Image (tube, helix red, strand yellow):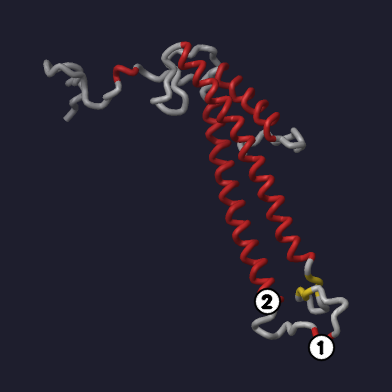
């Protein structure tokens, strides 16, 4: 049975419908073309709505800070990755490789009788190899988590840009500029155009 002709707008109960509890907030304006208008602009969330000049300015400042923060996360990841590689290389620098490819402790000037056995379970070599493997696993897990944060962050920034609002787009670009100035630390400015 078709009930489309029975509108639930106001049936004498003093309220309109049941689905839109936030009718007083207004409707979000979702543009699919470039615009400078901030009228009824919602930024990513319905609750992040531009209601006037002050909320627009505050929102643009927040967007600049968020985008600059993305560059900070990238810098943290680069520094962690460099430190992690340095820790792993420290394990390699303290050992050499034997004929069979098994890492050996650095014992060039130690007589053969005084060298530790590689077959014993308490061998420093095995402990070192286990420590290196643990450091490698922990580092890989941390780098994966930092990568996931970067991907989430980059898609969040993409959603900001997809408001198609010129002011928001400029705030994203200014945030990238500020972030690069604050966090680049000599890294090249080139970056792919991909979202992450």
SS type, badge 1: helix
Within the image, what quadrant is residue 138 found in? bottom right
Instruction: Give the percent coordinates (x, y) of residue 81.
Output: 68, 50
Left or right: 14 in relation to 184: left
Q: Is residue 55 left or right of residue 109?
A: left
- From the image, tell me which residue sits under label 1: 113
Q: Residue at x 59, y 53 (%)?
A: 142
Image: 138 above or below 21: below
Q: Left or right? Give the position of 108 relative to 14.
A: right
Find disc 2 in the rendering and name its residue: 126
Front position in the image: 60 or 6: 60
Mark 1 and mark 2 residues within 8 Å of each other at the beta carbon: no
Disc on the earlier residue, 1 or 2: 1
Residue in the foreground of this view, choosing between 192 and 60: 60
Q: Secondary structure at mark 2?
A: helix
Disc number placed over residue 122 in the picture, else none: none
Residue at image point 54% right, 12% down: 36
Q: Tell me which residue sits at (50%, 12%) in the image.
A: 37
**Coordinates of residue 151 in the picture (x, y in percent):** 57, 41
Picture quadrant where residue 41 is located:
top left
For disc 2, the neighbor class at 10 Å (few under 14, some 14 to 19, many from 20) is some
Mark nearest the camera among 1 and 2 is 1
């Amino acid at each position: 049975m078709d009930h489309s002709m029975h509108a639930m707008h106001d049936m004498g109960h003093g309220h309109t419908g049941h689905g839109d509890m936030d009718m007083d907030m207004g409707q979000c304006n979702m543009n699919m073309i470039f615009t400078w208008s901030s009228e009824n602009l919602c930024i990513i969330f319905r609750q992040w709505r531009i209601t006037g000049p002050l909320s627009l300015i505050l929102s643009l400042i927040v967007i600049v800070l968020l985008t600059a923060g993305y560059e900070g996360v990238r810098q943290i990841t680069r520094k962690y990755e460099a430190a992690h590689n340095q820790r792993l290389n420290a394990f390699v620098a303290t050992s050499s490789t034997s004929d069979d490819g098994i890492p050996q402790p650095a014992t060039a000037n130690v007589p053969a009788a005084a060298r530790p056995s590689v077959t014993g379970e308490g061998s420093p070599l095995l402990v070192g190899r286990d420590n290196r493997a643990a450091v490698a696993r922990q580092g890989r897990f941390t780098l994966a988590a930092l990568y996931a944060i970067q991907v989430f962050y980059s898609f969040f920034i993409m959603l900001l840009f997809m408001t198609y609002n010129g002011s928001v787009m400029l705030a994203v670009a200014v945030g990238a500029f500020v972030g690069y100035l604050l966090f680049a630390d000599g890294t090249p400015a080139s970056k792919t155009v991909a979202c992450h």
